[in-house]
């Protein structure tokens, strides 16, 4: 966020800043989503819905998981929320007690621990290696289990590396017989690996997903969580208390893209595949190497220790001198020291211009 705020300040001062930092698609949402929302408003679909979401949308979500992953889920297990972060708040609130422990990879999405701290639970970070995509392994998790360990938190494809967990790895996690917390928000954006849901291997899982990334619908604020049977009622009560229900007309847009948006979603994925190829080529040309081959999402984590001992300072120097915004790896955990994350949620034109600037920056800056 420090980088984001600094880049916005530079922008207000008249500088042309290219952001390779944000995890937000620059693409327009599918037309079918906008049209469905507009039609819902025209029909005055503006009232509360069922607290868990409209039945039609929940059925469409379960049908999506049946077709894509071969799992059958009751719509009662789906709770539609105003974004995926609220889904995390209510699901974790139902699952966790004070001082419960959740295993997290070092590296991880920065907001994960904040949910746990807020609820009085404790994240336990497991040291990771680049060869495993900076994600803990099933064996590491097994060795780390303690009586207070309530759940394992996994993410695939992951942020910040784009690593995708294999079916075998997910199956091994499921055998540990702990609750699984699985962030599947980047499903639909995989390139060199097949994505799998943890629900293929266990029902004792809280699966988070939504429409922000794969459908470029960030501003719609539409997400959902799939929960174990035993947690349906407590999570419904939390949803009723905190949010009442998710916006009715926004749910209409989600229903539309699940039912008729496959072509649009494949188009979004194709664009990111093209950008991924370009950014990897640009990195290679500057002697920069991805720490992990990005298999999904729209991120590349890069080792910059060849140029600096302080990647946080490196990111700010790059912003100030070259007007290119990137994210310091330390934002994602201690293992990120010495790394920076590039996002390719920007146009190919902007990516190429950014790397011209980065190249000049590297030539004029000594190792710091």
Image (cartoon, rainbow, N blue to C red):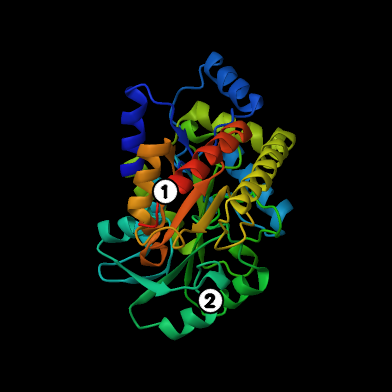
Residue 89 visible here: no
Give the residue number, with chain letter if any, for mark 2: 137
- Look at the picture and state if 113 lies above or below 43: below
Mark-to-mark CA distance, 1 and 2:
25 Å
Q: Quadrant of residue 145?
A: bottom left
Question: Which one is in front in this view, the residue at disc 1 or the one at disc 2?
Answer: 1
Q: How many marks?
A: 2
Q: Residues within 10 Å of mark 1 (few under 14, many from 20)?
A: many
Q: Secondary structure at mark 2?
A: loop
Query: Where does the image place residue 239, in percent across and percent down from the top left?
Result: 38, 45
> As rendered, which of 72 and 119 lies closer to the eye?
119
- Look at the picture and state if 32 lies above or below 307: above
* Quadrant of the snapshot with the C terminus: bottom left
Q: Is residue 100 left or right of residue 306?
A: left
> As rendered, which of 281 and 188 lies closer to the eye?
281
Tell me which numbered mark, 1 or 2, is placed earlier along the sequence.
Answer: 2
* Quadrant of the snapshot with the N terminus: top left
At 31% from the left and 30% from the top, the residue drawn is 9
Circle on res. 327: 1
Residue extending farthest bottom: 143
Residue 83 visible here: yes
Query: Where does the image place residue 62, in percent across and percent down from the top left?
Result: 63, 49
- Look at the picture and state if 214 lies above or below 100: above
> As rendered, which of 312 and 26 lies closer to the eye?
312
Q: Residues within 10 Å of mark 2 (few under 14, many from 20)?
A: many
């Amino acid at each position: 966020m420090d980088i984001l705020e600094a880049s916005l300040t530079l922008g207000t001062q008249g500088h042309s800043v290219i952001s390779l930092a944000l995890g937000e698609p620059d693409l327009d949402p599918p037309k079918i989503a906008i049209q469905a929302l507009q039609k819902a408003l025209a029909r005055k679909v503006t009232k509360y819905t069922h607290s868990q979401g409209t039945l039609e949308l929940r059925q469409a979500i379960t049908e999506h998981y049946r077709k894509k992953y071969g799992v059958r889920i009751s719509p009662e297990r789906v709770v539609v929320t105003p974004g995926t972060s609220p889904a995390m708040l209510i699901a974790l609130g139902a699952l966790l007690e004070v001082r419960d422990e959740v295993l997290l990879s070092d590296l991880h999405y920065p907001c994960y621990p904040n949910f746990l701290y807020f609820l009085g639970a404790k994240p336990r970070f497991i040291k990771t290696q680049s060869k495993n995509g900076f994600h803990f392994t099933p064996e590491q998790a097994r060795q780390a289990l303690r009586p207070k360990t309530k759940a394992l938190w996994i993410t695939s494809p992951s942020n910040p590396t784009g690593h995708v967990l294999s079916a075998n790895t997910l199956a091994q996690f499921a055998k540990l017989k702990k609750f699984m917390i699985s962030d599947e928000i980047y499903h639909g954006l995989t390139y060199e690996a097949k994505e799998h849901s943890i629900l293929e291997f266990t029902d004792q899982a809280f699966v988070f997903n939504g429409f922000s990334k794969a459908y470029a619908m960030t501003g719609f604020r539409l997400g959902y969580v799939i929960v174990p049977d035993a947690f349906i009622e407590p999570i419904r009560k939390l949803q009723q208390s905190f949010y009442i229900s998710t916006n009715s007309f926004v749910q209409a847009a989600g229903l539309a893209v699940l039912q008729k948006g496959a072509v649009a979603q494949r188009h979004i994925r194709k664009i990111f595949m093209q950008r991924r190829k370009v950014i990897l080529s640009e990195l290679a040309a500057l002697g920069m190497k991805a720490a992990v081959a990005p298999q999904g999402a729209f991120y590349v984590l890069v080792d910059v220790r060849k140029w600096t001992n302080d990647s946080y300072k490196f990111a700010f120097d790059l912003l100030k001198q070259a007007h290119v915004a990137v994210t310091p790896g330390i934002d994602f955990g201690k293992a990120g020291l010495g790394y920076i994350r590039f996002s390719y949620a920007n146009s190919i034109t902007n990516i190429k211009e950014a790397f011209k600037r980065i190249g000049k920056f590297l030539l004029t800056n000594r190792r710091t």
